[in-house]
Image (cartoon, helix red, strand yellow):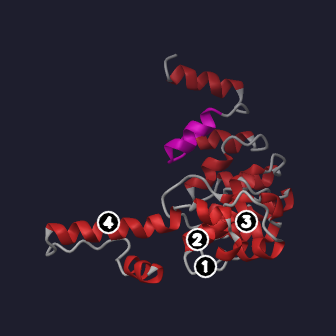
């Protein structure tokens, strides 16, 4: 019965493709089914969390994610299985529950492949630690999401910080705008950035030269 219900949910288009020919009842059913597909990935089942081991290899992602969310310690083999799960939601849940058990290579893979069910500014790297040498490698990564992590190294070399401040992706420039090792010339240049949030972060940097701070106040008529 569980398998049949799950198959019925999964048969729904996701995201839903609204068919104008559907009547009200059919439309309501289609919308409900589409929402429930997302809920299946996000829900955490207390009875699974209370007895997680039988569900580590469940065919249902929410069961595996619930197993990963257990408050009880899991055997190393079960932790490894959940950290290597095919579903981002399951891998991420296990990493959140036991970040101290996640090695650097696994942490990078989990963050790099993070695919949240709903939009969020949170990412696995917010709970997973990366050593400085890895953060510095991220500074030249092909993926701007990973380049955004480089400024989390408080001792990021100035040349890498300057390179990030000139990055074509505004989220990367924004991430480095308040770094203490960002050269003054790069920081001042960000005050004229095309991205408003980058400008705001640069303007709020405690490392901005005093004369620039005074000029900003003058321009703001404060």
Q: Residue 63 bears which disc, if any?
A: 2
Residue 203 part of the magenta-drawn span: yes
Q: Give the quarter of the image for residue 35.
A: bottom left
Tell me the mark number nearer the camera, choosing from 4 and 1.
Answer: 1
Q: Residue 186 bears which disc, if any?
A: none
Circle count: 4
Give the extent of the magenta segment: 191-204
Marks 1 and 2 in Cβ contact (< 8 Å): yes
Q: Earlier in the sequence, mark 2 or mark 3?
A: 2
How far apart are labels 1 and 2 at the CA level? 6 Å
Q: Mark 4 sits on what residue?
A: 32
Marks 2 and 3 in Cβ contact (< 8 Å): no
Q: Position of residue 57 (x, y in %)?
A: 65, 80
Which residue is at a point 32% across and 71% down the rendered structure image?
16
Q: Mark 1 sits on what residue?
A: 58
Q: Would residue 59 be found to the left or right of residue 22 on screen?
A: right
Q: Position of residue 202 (x, y in %)?
A: 62, 38
The one nearer the camera, 62 or 121, is: 62
Q: Residue 140 bears which disc, if any?
A: 3
Q: Position of residue 157 (x, y in %)?
A: 83, 51
- Disc 1 element: loop
Can the viewer see residue 30? yes
- Disc 2 element: helix
The one nearer the camera, 70 or 15, is: 70
How far apart are labels 1 and 3 at the CA level? 39 Å
Q: Earlier in the sequence, mark 2 or mark 4?
A: 4
How far apart are labels 2 and 3 at the CA level? 38 Å
Q: Position of residue 67 (x, y in %)?
A: 66, 67
Which residue is at a point 81% across and 46% down the rendered structure image?
154
Tell me the quarter of the image containing the N terminus.
Answer: bottom left
Marks 1 and 3 in Cβ contact (< 8 Å): no
């Amino acid at each position: 019965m569980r398998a049949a219900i799950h198959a019925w949910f999964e048969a729904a288009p996701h995201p839903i493709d609204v068919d104008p020919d559907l009547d009200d009842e059919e439309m309501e059913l289609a919308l409900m089914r589409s929402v429930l597909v997302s809920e299946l990935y996000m829900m955490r089942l207390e009875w699974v969390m209370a007895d997680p081991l039988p569900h580590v290899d469940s065919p249902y992602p929410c069961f595996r994610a619930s197993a990963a969310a257990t408050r009880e310690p899991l055997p190393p083999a079960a932790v490894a299985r959940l950290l290597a799960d095919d579903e981002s939601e399951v891998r991420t849940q296990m990493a959140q529950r036991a970040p101290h058990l996640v090695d650097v290579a696994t942490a990078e893979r989990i963050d790099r492949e993070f695919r949240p069910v709903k939009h969020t500014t949170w990412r696995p790297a917010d709970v997973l630690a990366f050593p400085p040498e890895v953060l510095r490698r991220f500074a030249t990564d092909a993926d701007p999401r990973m380049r955004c992590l480089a400024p989390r190294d408080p001792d990021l070399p100035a040349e890498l910080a300057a390179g990030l401040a000139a990055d074509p992706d505004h989220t990367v420039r924004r991430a480095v705008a308040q770094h203490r090792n960002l050269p003054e010339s790069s920081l001042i240049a960000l005050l004229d950035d095309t991205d408003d949030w980058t400008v705001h972060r640069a303007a709020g940097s405690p490392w901005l030269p005093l004369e620039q701070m005074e000029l900003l106040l003058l321009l703001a008529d404060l």
